[in-house]
Amino acid sequence: MKVSIGSDHGGYELKLEVIEHLKARGFEVIDVGTDSPASCDYPIYAKKVAADITSKNADLGILICGTGIGMSMAANKIEGIRAALCHDTFSAQATREHNDANILCMGARVVGPGLALMIIDTFLDTPFSNDERHIRRISMYS
Ligand code: RB5
């Protein structure tokens, strides 16, 4: 599985830990930036990860900023993106099963790295249910 990941300065340090974890787990990782802890604008990276998903260059995406909120708002403006802001493993599992979420958003100022990695593992390891009622509801998003 190929994962596209991006962050702003608020998520930069956590992103580095996440990339190391994903590579150790055998995932192919596309890092779209940011490449330093210098202040930057998170929508740039939300759009880059979203483009990797809509172009099918990646299977799933991860976006990290300070809260995860700006990233999720920016990503969800893009057609075909279903970005879920999750700070617990139940939500990460449910959003893959019910919403077929294709981007996970998290706030590095909200969760520590231990919980963040558990949330990410849950998100990446949970398949969409393919349940008819969930397919119908997702089709009603746009
Ligand atoms: C940057 O200070 C912060 O606003 C950003 O990381 C994010 O939390 C926005 O939603």
Image (tube, rainbow, N blue to C red):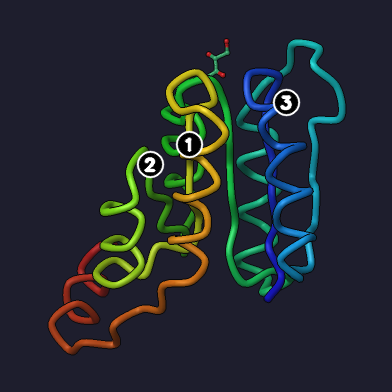
Amino acid type, callout 1: Met
Residue sitting at the far left: 133
Q: Position of residue 22 (x, y in %)?
A: 71, 58
Tell whether circle 2 marks a residue whose Cβ is less than 8 angstroms from ligand 1.
no
- In the depicted structure, whether residue 116 falls above or below residue 112: below
The part of the image, by quadrant, that contains residue 7 is top right
**Residue at the spot 79% in from the left edge and 16% down from the top edge:** 37
Q: Position of residue 70 (x, y in %)?
A: 47, 27
> Pointers 1 and 2 in contact (CB under 8 A)?
yes
Residue sitting at the far front: 114
Q: Earlier in the sequence, mark 1 or mark 3?
A: 3
Q: Quadrant of the N terminus?
A: bottom right
Q: Earlier in the sequence, mark 1 or mark 2?
A: 2
Q: Can you identify the residue that label 3 sits on?
A: 13
Counting other residues with Cα less than 10 Å from the Cα at mark 1, is it few (<14), some (14-19), or many (20 or more)? Answer: many
Q: Earlier in the sequence, mark 2 or mark 3?
A: 3
Report the front residue among 97 and 39: 97
Tell whether circle 1 marks a residue whose Cβ is less than 8 angstroms from ligand 1.
no
Amino acid type, callout 3: Glu
Q: CA distance from mark 1 to mark 2?
A: 6 Å
Element at badge 3?
A: helix
Q: Can you identify the residue that label 1 sits on?
A: 106
Horizontal side, residue 73 vs residue 116: left or right: left
Q: CA distance from mark 1 to mark 3?
A: 13 Å
Q: Can you identify the residue that label 2 sits on?
A: 85
Q: Quadrant of the C terminus?
A: bottom left
> Pointers 2 and 3 in contact (CB under 8 A)?
no
Q: In front: mark 1 or mark 3?
A: 3
**Residue at the spot 60% in from the left edge and 67% down from the top edge:** 54
**Residue at the spot 85% in from the left edge and 22% down from the top edge:** 36
Horizontal side, residue 130 vs residue 33: left or right: left
Amino acid type, callout 2: Leu
